[in-house]
Amino acid sequence: MKWKRSERLVDMTRYLLESPHELIPLTKFSERYESAKSSISEDLTIIKATFEETGAGKLVTVTGAAGGVKFIPKMGDLEVREVISLLMDELGHSDRLLPGGYLFMADLLGNPYIMDCVGKVFASRFSDTEIDVIMTVATKGIPIAHAIARHLNVPVVIVRRDSKVTEGSTVSINYVSGSTRRIQTMMLSKRSMKSGQKVLITDDFMKAGGTMVGMKHLLEEFGCELAGTAVLVEAEHHEEVILDNYSSLVKLLSVNEKNRTIVLSEGNYFLEGGK
Amino acid sequence: MKWKRSERLVDMTRYLLESPHELIPLTKFSERYESAKSSISEDLTIIKATFEETGAGKLVTVTGAAGGVKFIPKMGDLEVREVISLLMDELGHSDRLLPGGYLFMADLLGNPYIMDCVGKVFASRFSDTEIDVIMTVATKGIPIAHAIARHLNVPVVIVRRDSKVTEGSTVSINYVSGSTRRIQTMMLSKRSMKSGQKVLITDDFMKAGGTMVGMKHLLEEFGCELAGTAVLVEAEHHEEVILDNYSSLVKLLSVNEKNRTIVLSEGNYFLEGGK
């Protein structure tokens, strides 16, 4: 195949989108397309300008012998606000109200388009943070963790509340649930993480933050470091949140089971601490 | 912004890749780029040829008033074999062997690149099958289900073994685990599926197929129909597999705990029944 510029642009765009946060040497492209590096550079200039104009992300060029190009997914504030407003529209429906004032969210967490948006938002938020691993607790945080992971190009590890033979040996901790004050256990496969790794923790819902703090203690048991916390929905509550830094997209201010109303606001994504 | 062809090609490629299995009217593109439909058609011809040449997938054009263009992720056999061979290389390492002859796979299931490949393989396999929902059982099937779902553009529903208040009311069934012959329970939120939907079931590992058959019975309780079964790894075993049609990528033929050997082969993806 003899590659024309138009075909190179299509294929390179796909290649870059499928390889976020990966440094691609220019020689890789010049070999693939049997084209001079100068032509490849011109192609990349077009892609870079278009990505920036449309809010797809940044193309970062690293010069020198070990150089190349890297695609960093990065949404603009406008696009982030659109995602948050989509989430608030969806979450505000009164038929989501469950007994006890809980919200039904399984359909949102099962929607691949919405999860991809959420993943891109948090990947944008943490695009300049060094992250080696994303950690979540089974079950509902898994789609969010994987959506972020794909855009940051890092692995996901899953904390469980029960031990399974397929996990091999595990490290487990006891922690106190923030809202119910009950003692619970969580565990993680010993071979999931290496000492010194930087960990982003994520979950679908946070009230007092007990589960998040549990994950923080667990990753410390591995000699790892907390790099950030990403929460889809945080709930207003009377006690203090026991976690300092986190970024949330939506805040659940109140629910009224009798009148079946749900009051939401934007999370702290755009505020100090969240951003 | 005045769009040049080169910029349109980059942006349209991204748009199509992010909207698989979605019919996009040409007017959408001609409005976005303020360009004549004839120019858009020429752009799409270039993208179509490049996607087909590189094994990215197909662009299907639907003519008429309700027409448009649809991107169908479709891997070639060569690319599928590369994914299968990558999986076999990874799974064959003797340090995956766990007591009882189980294989540690959490790292593969937590790798977003590998999950994306697996998702694309199964999305290719079922690209011509009518599928409304992907169903899996917590916890390990979730990354696979979401990876397939993103490429097929359909929602994921997650069957659980325990009931949680955040699921709302549930439908539950008892089933007999294929290999241990124990009676187990699985349940699914009542509002997860509508009667008449076509369901693809998926999981990371299948031995006798008991869990899969349990999911089949559960979806029948919802008045839904089994559309297909996708399995990452199937294990050889003496009794008959109690599920007729399934597609697997890798087959675990035998493990020897003493010598620490793992014998694998290709799954049935390319065989009658699997394909």
Image (cartoon, coloured by chain):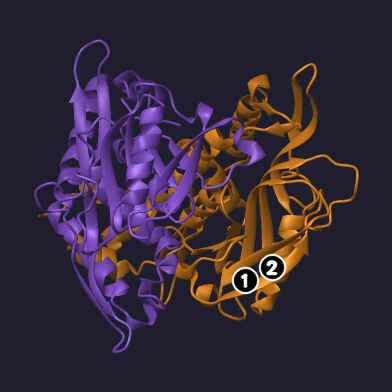
Chain colours: A purple, B orange
Q: Which mark is residue B226?
A: 2
Q: Earlier in the sequence, mark 1 or mark 2?
A: 1
The answer to whether marks 1 and 2 sit on the same chain is yes
Which subunit holds the residue at mark 2?
Answer: B
Name the side, left or right, on which A53 lies relative to A21: left
Q: Which mark is residue A161?
A: none
What is the x, y in percent for residue B12?
30, 53
Q: Residue at x 46, y 61 (%)?
A: B153
Q: Residue at x 35, y 70 (%)?
A: B25
Q: Residues within 10 Å of mark 1 (few under 14, many from 20)?
A: many
Up-down relation of residue A25 to residue B139 (above or below): above
Q: What is the C-alpha distance between the residues marked 1 and 2?
A: 6 Å
Which subunit holds the residue at mark 1?
Answer: B
Residue A153 at least partly seen: no
| Disc 1 and disc 2 in contact, CB within 8 angstroms | yes
Q: Residue at x 68, y 32 (%)?
A: B103
| Depth order, front residue of A165/A88 | A165
Q: Residues within 10 Å of mark 2 (few under 14, many from 20)?
A: some
- Under mark 2, the amino acid is Leu
- Under mark 1, the amino acid is Lys
What is the x, y in percent for residue A186?
48, 43
What is the x, y in percent for residue A252?
24, 68
Q: Quadrant of residue A47?
A: top left
Up-down relation of residue B210 to residue A31 (above or below): below
| Depth order, front residue of A193/B17 | A193
Residue A61 at least partly seen: yes
The residue pinned by badge 1 equals B198
What is the x, y in percent for residue B205?
68, 45
Name the side, left or right, on which B78 lies relative to B41: right
Q: Quadrant of residue A46?
A: top left
